[in-house]
Image (cartoon, grey):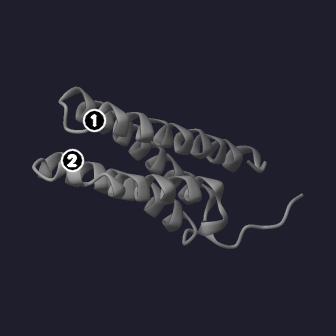
Amino acid sequence: MGEKINSFTKLHAWQASHQLVLAIFSVREPFHRYDVLRNQIERSTLSISSNIAERFGRGTINDKKHFYIIARGSAFEVQNQLLVARDTAKISDKDFQKLAQLPLYSRRLLHCLIRSQKKMVRC
């Protein structure tokens, strides 16, 4: 068995979602006139890393798994919001290409963590 992770910042899923937050905030300018979409995508993105962090404060396996599931749902939200932003020309195709893979990667890592809560295996 590997070393026990004692901080959410050590989880690859949190690190990936944190990079997504930084990337989303780095392209805020194209959204400046679209406050509703900008606010929603920022909230959804923050929800991913925040739920991973909150999971560390929970006691039971079911509580922990629940927060990973919420984070994974938020990754789906971000993916949808990026598609809406691209398809309505709120962000450029270049920005979309830069951002689109990040929620997918976070989602894969979260899926692995959710599975690991059942099987007690490390991802």
Residue 59: image tag: none
Q: Of all residues shown, which one is farthest toward the top?
A: 87
Identified at 42% across, 59% down, the residue is 22
Looking at the rendered image, the quarter that the N terminus falls into is bottom right
User: Which one is in front, 21 or 10?
Assistant: 21
Residue type, numbered disc 1: Ser
The crowding category of the residue bearing disc 2, from other C-alpha atoms within 10 Å (few below 14, some 14 to 19, many at least 20), is some
State if disc 2 and disc 1 touch (CB < 8 Å): yes
Residue 30: image tag: 2
Identified at 29% across, 38% down, the residue is 81
Q: Of all residues shown, which one is farthest toward the left?
A: 33
Residue type, numbered disc 2: Pro
User: Which one is in front, 8 or 20?
Assistant: 20
The answer to whether residue 33 is left or right of residue 29 is left
Residue 92: image tag: 1
Per the image, label 2 sits on a secondary structure element best described as helix
Measure the C-alpha gap from mark 1 to mark 2. Answer: 8 Å
The answer to whether residue 90 is left or right of residue 50 is left
Instruction: Tell me where residue 121 appears, x and y as whole percent.
Output: 78, 48
Where, by quadrant of the figure, is residue 98 drawn? top left
* Dot placed on the residue nearer the N-terminal end, 1 or 2: 2
Instruction: Tell me where residue 52 appears, x and y as whole percent.
Output: 52, 60
Per the image, label 1 sits on a secondary structure element best described as loop
The answer to whether residue 77 is left or right of residue 32 is right
Instruction: Tell me where residue 16 appears, x and y as whole percent.
Output: 56, 53
Identified at 49% across, 59% down, the residue is 18
Identified at 64% across, 55% down, the residue is 12
Question: Relative to residue 107, is residue 40 depicted above or below?
Answer: below
Question: Relative to residue 36, is residue 15 depicted above or below?
Answer: below
Where, by quadrant of the figure, is residue 63 drawn? bottom right
